Image (cartoon, helix red, strand yellow):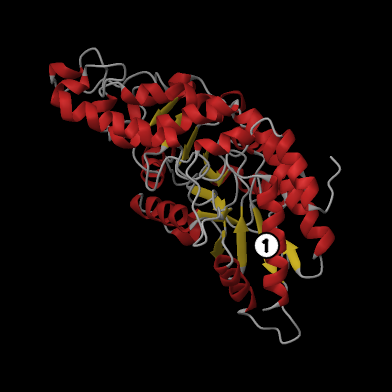
Amino acid sequence: MQFENSLEFAEKMDQQDPLAAIRNDFAIPKMDNGDDEVYLCGNSLGLQPKLAAEYVQRELAQWASLGVKGHFSGDFPWMPYHEFLSEGFADLVGAKTEEVVAMNTLTANLHFMMVSFYRPTETRHKILIEEHAFPSDHYAVESQIKFHGFDPKESMLLIKPRAGEDLIRNEDLIELIEKEGESIALIMLPGVQYYTGQVFDMQAITQLGHAKGCKVGFDLAHAAGNIVMNLHDWQVDFACWCTYKYLNSGPGSVAGCFVHENHHKDEDLPRFAGWWGHDKSTRFKMENTFKPIHSAEAWQLSNPPVLSLAAIRGSLDTIKKAGGINALREKSLKLTGFMRHLLTTQIPERITILTPSEEKYSGSQLSLTVRLNEKDDPERGKRVFTALEDAGVTGDWRYPNVIRVAPVPQYNSFKDVYRFVEILKNAIDNH
């Protein structure tokens, strides 16, 4: 669409925005003067939906009045509570309800998935990840390789950008899988790269990986609630995501997991088992012969924390009220497109945008670097970021030199985007 460089245009877009009222369903942090912050940090921690607080309070009241009977009483009894999230999760990632489950936390889930889907042999033992993976993913992969008795120097295969570039080229990734595929046991890449905001072509990666005999899984921490996915149709083996970024479910909230139905009935598939993954019809007979549920629930260990699930349910209901992931993505493209337009037309010589410009390869997040001045001052970017914070903008800083900002369609406005760019221009001029 055609964007204009004016506050009036931003205000007109907000007036025409069918999702504008959803902002009122969130708690927006305030500055000292009482004005709303320009909160652009949903890629790290999303804001609190009012329904999340309401639903958590409801379960606290249930606990107070019913005690243990709350496991089986009321509209949302605790024992099956995780099942109330399945439809929302499935809609977000393009899955069947039986392919998703709320359990554990993100890195824990990656480990549990690798127990099942990283089965190295002497000839096929490598795990392919990106060189600048989120540290927790790197640690998890490295430790799994060591656990199986292999050397990460030989078994960790890293895809990286070309020299002098920031993004991984699709053709380089394809070439590496084609070349090394016979030795790769598992491809585990992000849906959206945390540092650059680059979206990976998950469908193509999965198809190519399977053609080479590899298992394929994704870390969707920055993808869930951000971009449209179809994990079931793409035949992805597994995927894991946190729920506190674009899913707005609270710090450290319970994570999500996808396991394709192709694997549900394989009772010989190795896994770390717990009683919440055991067949529901006989779970409480307390027998010591594990019979996995024929769904993603089979990978559960323990009954999950209901208060966290309640917050997630509040967030998912808020997303549903907004029209779901397709409606959110439609607004996201406009919000981020407006931000990119303002940056590239007003301060192109002072800011570099690392995130790809093609819509297919970018989500809500833009990763920015502040170009050095004539003194080549390496701390300039951090000073600009601090000035943004002082002026009421919440984004985040990632070493060595990236400012990440994410206009989230549920609660950010076009006026937020305009204000951010005005504040950024002033911060750069004065630092």
Tell me the quadrant of the picture where the N terminus can be found. top right
Crowdedness near tag 1: few (<14), some (14–19) or many (≥20) residues, C-alpha within 10 Å? many
Which of the 4 quarters of the picture holds residue 377?
Answer: bottom right
Type of amino acid under label 1: Leu
Q: Nearer the viewer, residue 149 or 93?
A: 93
Which of the 4 quarters of the picture holds residue 276?
Answer: top left
Q: Is residue 293 above or below residue 205?
A: above
Residue at x 38% of width, y 50% of height: 144
Residue 229 horizontal side relative to residue 122, left or right: right
Q: Is residue 293 above or below residue 253?
A: above
Residue 9 horizontal side relative to residue 46, left or right: right
Residue 308 horizontal side relative to residue 8, left or right: left
In the rendered image, is residue 260 in sight? no
Tell me the residue that label 1 is attached to.
368
Label 1 sits on a secondary structure element that is strand
The picture places residue 421, in percent across and down from the top left corner, at 71, 60
Q: Nearer the viewer, residue 162 or 242?
A: 242
Q: Is residue 376 above or below residue 384?
A: below
The picture places residue 373, in percent across and down from the top left corner, at 74, 81
Residue at x 76% of width, y 48% of height: 338
Q: Nearer the viewer, residue 124 or 104?
A: 104
Q: Is residue 353 above or below residue 318?
A: below
